[in-house]
């Protein structure tokens, strides 16, 4: 499903998940549910009070990398639905795979979710949870399944299990170990737990139906032997649960009502239900049980979100880290200058559907511009500086060093922000492309004989230029026209077609300006199976030495401005200092790519 590009922010979109929740609430499906104050089994919740949350959702990242813009959709959806319906959203780390998970990622995910504007603390209670906290229960549940004849230990090789699983046209073949008694399986499971067997020697499988047309029900694996140090539990365990086994249990222990996930888990829903129903029948889990609902993944054009491939970009030095402003990680987008409000607007505006969608990047940029337009104060900046000398300055003002005080609104629609102050002198910096010795048709800026207005200043007439030995223009020369200051009676006495921005040489603040663009030149970098490296944009980052208004001296990190004529910029949250300012371009004033 494609979403047309738009230059205005999307409005809150309705979606089928809201309809499901409203139907469930109207039917009273979750009324009478009890919550023990923390995650727990059936007995724990039976002893608890009625659940104060009308619904419970969760955002369950695996801490094996940094969150990206695709995760933002799930974050906004789960936390947003909980907020809309008087519910609570949990932040839960699915940390069941110790080989890939690190505390660094846990900390980064917590910071990113908070930065987006969401909180899991409700009524003085934190709903921050870890799957690894449930390892004891998960193992107890595994023994219960074995005791009920619903799971068994399989000692086939991985290759044999794969071959015996069958395919979409061929039913699976029972394992030769499938007929063991519960007592035999329980003994082998405990040997697995106690470290008596090598990694990969055996697994615990559910006993369901090897002939099922849904391959996910052909005795899926529940536990595997893996000697790996876990960031939270250390070396306590040498067996770890599979995600498909752990995830439903986590939802049930936390009393999640609506388990919202992306479409690739749709085929896993029958196992999700099978597992929870059986554990509830065995008295381990409280009813009503969670229900899984799938929605289409959000894909953004000109973006790649595979964690593996993003890791390649970092490892190969294509980008300068996970927070490189060209990266689609939330840390990268934050450093680029994207606002949490703009990302939330994009996510909310795209709604939720039962199909995957491609969203044009211009929609996100439109949300960003809509947010910054009303918030970002204005400033003048020169990004490709060329000196301009006003040759009759002393003649007009009596001194070459005279400075004319100028002012301008900090924001044209927000008078409460006041005025910004700067000086106009004989020596200025202007944009190099604001001068042309031989202008093209329709060029209304500086060229010999033409007049322009210096924004917030006066009118000047170009008289020529100076060049170096290679013929490159080194300075533009102009005459000021007296009594043409902006805001004075003479301002309209001289009609001009062009107005240019500038910064006076005497009070300009030297700054590094980084012009970022899209990392890829194609909307779908991996379309047709091509190597994404072949469509990397060689101009995705340009570093220039520029000048900004004096009012930006001493700016703090992560402050945003609209540089007039150029776009929106932010002080870099890593490299910027008051002594050596660094401004990143967030986005241009309009989408120059629109056709």
Image: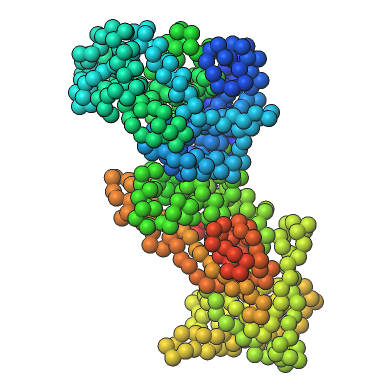
Q: Position of residue 582 (x, y in %)?
A: 56, 65
Between 290 and 1, the one nearer to me in the picture = 290
Quadrant in which residue 590 is drawn: bottom right
Residue 20 in which image quadrant: top right
x then y, percent, for residue 506: 66, 80
* Residue 263 visible to an observer of this rendering: no
Extreme-right residue of the structure: 489
Picture coordinates of residue 421, whole percent (x, y): 74, 70
Q: Is residue 499 above or below residue 589?
A: below
Residue pictured at 28% horizontal, 29% vertical:
199
Q: Quarter holding the N terminus?
A: top left
Which residue is found at the position 32% from the left and 8% from the top? 182
Residue 387, placed above or below residue 515: below
Q: Is residue 170 left or right of residue 215?
A: left
Left or right: 535 as drawn, with respect to 361 = left
For image coordinates 24% across by 8% down, the residue present is 179
- Residue 526 visible in the shown view: yes
């Amino acid at each position: 499903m494609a979403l047309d590009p738009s230059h205005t922010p999307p409005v809150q979109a309705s979606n089928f998940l809201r309809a499901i929740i409203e139907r469930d609430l109207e039917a009273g499906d979750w009324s009478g549910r009890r919550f023990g104050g923390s995650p727990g089994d059936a007995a724990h919740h039976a002893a608890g009070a009625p659940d104060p949350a009308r619904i419970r959702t969760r955002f369950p990242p695996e801490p094996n990398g940094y969150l990206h813009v695709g995760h933002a959709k799930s974050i906004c959806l789960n936390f947003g639905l909980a907020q809309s319906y008087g519910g609570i959203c949990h932040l839960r780390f699915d940390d069941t795979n110790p080989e890939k998970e690190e505390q660094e990622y846990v900390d980064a995910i917590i910071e990113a979710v908070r930065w987006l504007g969401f909180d899991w603390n409700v009524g003085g209670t934190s709903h921050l949870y870890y799957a690894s906290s449930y390892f004891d229960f998960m193992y107890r549940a595994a023994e219960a399944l074995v005791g009920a004849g619903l799971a068994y230990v399989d000692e086939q090789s991985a290759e044999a299990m794969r071959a015996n699983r069958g395919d979409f046209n061929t039913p699976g073949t029972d394992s030769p170990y499938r007929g063991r008694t519960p007592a035999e399986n329980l003994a082998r499971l405990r040997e697995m737990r106690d470290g008596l067997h090598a990694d990969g020697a055996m697994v615990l499988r559910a006993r369901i139906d090897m002939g099922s047309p849904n391959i996910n029900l052909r005795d899926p694996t529940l536990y595997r032997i893996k000697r790996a140090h876990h960031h939270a539990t250390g070396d306590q365990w040498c067996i770890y649960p599979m995600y498909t086994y752990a995830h439903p249990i986590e939802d049930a222990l936390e009393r999640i009502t609506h388990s919202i996930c992306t479409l690739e888990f749709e085929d896993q829903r029958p196992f999700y239900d099978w597992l929870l129903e059986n554990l509830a029948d065995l008295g381990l889990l409280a009813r009503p049980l969670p229900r899984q609902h799938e929605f289409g993944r959000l894909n953004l054009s000109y973006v790649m979100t595979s964690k593996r491939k993003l890791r390649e970009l970092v490892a190969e030095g294509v980008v300068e880290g996970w927070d490189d402003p060209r990266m689609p990680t939330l840390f990268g987008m934050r450093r680029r200058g994207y606002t949490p409000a703009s990302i939330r607007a994009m996510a909310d505006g795209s709604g939720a559907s039962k199909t995957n969608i491609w969203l044009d990047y211009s929609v996100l940029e439109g949300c960003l511009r809509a947010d910054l337009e009303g918030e970002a104060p204005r400033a003048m900046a020169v990004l490709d500086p060329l000196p301009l000398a006003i040759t009759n300055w002393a003649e007009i003002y009596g001194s070459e060093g005279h400075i004319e005080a100028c002012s301008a609104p900090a924001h044209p629609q927000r008078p409460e922000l006041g005025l910004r102050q700067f000086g106009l002198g004989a020596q200025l910096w202007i944009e190099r492309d604001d001068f042309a010795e031989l202008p093209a048709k329709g060029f209304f800026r500086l060229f010999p004989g033409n007049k322009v207005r210096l924004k917030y200043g006066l009118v000047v007439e170009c008289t020529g230029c100076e060049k170096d030995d290679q013929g490159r223009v080194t300075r533009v020369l102009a005459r000021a026209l007296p009594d043409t200051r902006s805001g004075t009676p003479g301002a309209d006495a001289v009609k001009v077609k062009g107005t240019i921005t500038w910064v006076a040489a005497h009070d300009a603040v030297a700054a590094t300006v980084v012009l970022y663009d899209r990392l890829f030149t194609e909307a779908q970098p991996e379309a047709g199976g091509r190597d994404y490296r072949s469509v990397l944009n060689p101009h995705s980052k340009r570093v220039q030495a520029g000048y900004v208004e004096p009012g930006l001296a001493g700016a703090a990190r992560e402050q945003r401005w609209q540089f007039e004529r150029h776009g929106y910029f932010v002080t870099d949250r890593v490299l910027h200092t008051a002594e050596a300012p660094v401004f990143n371009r967030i986005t241009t004033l309009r989408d120059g790519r629109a056709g």
